[in-house]
Amino acid sequence: MAVLACFLAAGRGGDNGRQGVGRRRGVVGAVWMRVRSELRARWRSWLGLALLIGLTGAAAVAAAAGARRTETAYPRFVQAQNGYDLITGGFPGNIDPARALARIEALPEVAQWARIDVAAATAILPSGRVAPAPELMAVTDLRGRAGFRLNRFKVISGRMADRHAPGEAVIDFPTADREGLRVGSVIKYIVGDPNAKRPKLAAVRIVGIVASPGQFPAVGTSSGLSSVYVTPAFVRSNHIRPSPGDAALLIRLRHGAADREAFLRHKAAAGLGSVDVPLVQQVQTAGIQRSIRLESQALWALSVLIGLAAFAVVGQSLARQTYLDSADLPALRALGFSRGQLFSLGIFRAAIIGVAAACVVVPVAVLLSPLTPVGLAKIAEPDPGFAVDAVPLVSGAVLAAVLTMLACVVPAWTAARTAAARGEGPRPGRARSPAFTSALARAWRSPAAGTGVRMALQPGRGRTAVPVRSAIFGTTLGVAALAASLVFAASLSHLLTTPRLAGFTWDAFVFVDSQQGKAAAALRADPKIAGYTRGGFTNVRIGSVKVIALVLGSSGPARPVITAGVPPTAGDEVALGAATMRDAHTAIGRTVDVALDQAGGHPKPARMRVVGTVIVPPNPFQATQLGEGAALAPPGAMRIDPHAARQQGGSPFLVRFTPGVSRDTGLTAITKDLTGLPNPFVAAAERPADVVSLAAIAGLPVALSGLLALIAAGTLAHMLASSTRRRRRDLAILKTLGFTRRQVRHAVAWQATTIAAIALLIGLPAGIAGGRWAWRMFAIQLGVLPEPAVPLTTILIAIPAALVLANLTAAGPGRAAARTQSAAILRTE
């Protein structure tokens, strides 16, 4: 202090011409000299805070950079894999497919093309289930273009098939996931007459799982190509002659989507206007991007949540550090420091910590970049590994420094103002212990336990005061955030394993062209079938909004999933999806015009009353988004469709399996039940693309939980370290009175245990309530049934785990406290 006083005195000297400049330089120099002095003495504490801020900031920045990377992964994948622009296929009877394909290939807009032929249509899966066309067809490109030059394959696992090996094949990853296939699985195909008593079979072994443009699950579009890619050698060795009528032509246009209209005009001018164009990459990309958008939004949400949690929890540590560093402010005030200088001193400290944290943010965020993208975007990412995205990295580093200083503004100003009014510095608390603290401390026979409880709950006075309230608040906030993320993760897992929440109250969609009575009798007689409901899907217009309506009969296990109101039962009642209700600008209790949406005519609409909000699951062609759609009772469908009454006997079956029957077993049973019936169609109830995307990011809430646990532990560790340093005199007195080193360690452990117990007592109920509310809001926006799940087992396990973690965190500060040199410390007092 003497050196500092001389420095201040020197700063006031000089001639009159340089007096103002000298004073300003002296003021700045005095503040900077004090900051350097504190840095030498307290660099460990400041470094700990900087690392805590930097690591949490890096996690938030990595999540933000991953969100940006996720958003662009699929478009970059299409470009890198030379994706197609459109696919043609489906030839009317009056057009020769072979000549049509040749003429389309020669159109001026076509830059590249690849022809995919169907080698076999009916597959026998490893489970024994027969998958009829077009569920799992074997396709190939005899010219070797598809998958290699155009729409190139990206191998996810395994390897590419040898073109000269007839028994090798690769499969697209959505089909492999859906059917439970992996590298090494063997699929048998019927390559001869399927009606023969002993049809000829050819087996292929899956040697690779691949991805290519157009294969990803897409919201609101068809499921794309779900195929097993066999080799040309398979076709030759089994003497297969593919039919040109079953071929599909992948086309890449010279100028991409800009050439599509010209291509369609030239195709029509060549007399091929009726040739179908079932898939357009631009439409597929839009649907896939909607599917991936959930993943990027999840990463953005993760980034924001980490940032808010870090700012709220670590901000308490910053405020506590500012308070602890303010003990000498009254002395500095007496030496001539102004209130502004004292405030600047606190901001300088925060700036040093913030800049150090910013230096941690950038390299750690780059090191974390290989963890992103996530989900489907991770499969699509053409350039995995480390990535440097300057925008989030620089922005995150700047925000870490700025927010660190902002978090210290109020504590620094309060400390500076208090120092000007008091002579001993901040004195929180009271001279006497509160009754509750005294009673709780006396409840333990162990002196170490009683001392630890007092240290946790009693701030103290003067130079030994510790802001325990902010420590308890920060730890409680961390526990609450941890509990909320656990509830969110459990609710997400519950959604992924409960089809009913996405609208499915059946397991399979079954349709036969005729002989409905035989099909119904066979399904009723099968013990693996619990029951069925007659129903289906139809296109309707709600006002001017076009959606797909679910029609379910009154008998059977399948029922519409209603989130609000009641299901429709009468001919003048309708239930709408949440998104459809918003688009139609209506609500429960109001009336809307409902009409059949069909080509070539505009039937007269019927006036119906909205009686509920319904979740309409995707139809077998994945053409419905969650939150969209409508539900009608059979009388309502007959009211808007004059032909519905005649077609009611031919409506599909929505089949429920007997409890305990697996998907493959149930589908195999249905296939056997329908043997001999004309053109049976069986489709399993598949998860919506939105839910598939959620399945890919199910680990993010768990990762957030772990990170929040680390933040809470780091905050507690900083508090214990600061408290131990601040209370060295009290610890020295305890050792003088007879405390052993072991008792001192136990006292610090009891301090940590008390804080953790209070945080658990308050934070767990608050976090559970917050997690349930957050999941309800998310589920409503997603369009699924908002049914939160509380992981009681996990939370019960987390309670002792948190106490153990608190004691482990206290081990380091406890050892430091036990090494306190009583004589040396008391001699300096």
Image (tube, grey):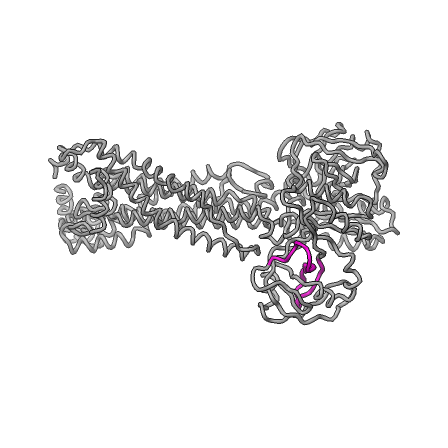
Instruction: Please report the residue visible at 22 percent of the width from the left and 37 percent of the height from the top.
Output: 446
User: Magenta part of the protein: which range?
Assistant: 537-561
Question: In the drawing, does residue 564 fall left or right of residue 11?
Answer: right
Query: In this view of the protein, which residue sits in the foreground, 41 or 305?
Result: 305
Magenta-drawn stretch contains 547: yes
For the C terminus, give its image quadrant. Answer: top left
Question: In the drawing, does residue 99 fall left or right of residue 132?
Answer: right
Magenta-drawn stretch contains 312: no
Question: In the drawing, does residue 176 fall left or right of residue 812?
Answer: right
For the N terminus, give its image quadrant. Answer: top left
Q: Where does the image place residue 451, in percent across and percent down from the top left?
A: 21, 41
Residue 823 appears in view? yes
Picture quadrant where residue 725 is located: top left
Q: Where does the image place residue 238, in percent across and percent down from the top left?
A: 82, 31
Question: In the drawing, does residue 340 fall left or right of residue 700?
Answer: left
Query: In this view of the protein, which residue sits in the foreground, 377 or 704?
Result: 704
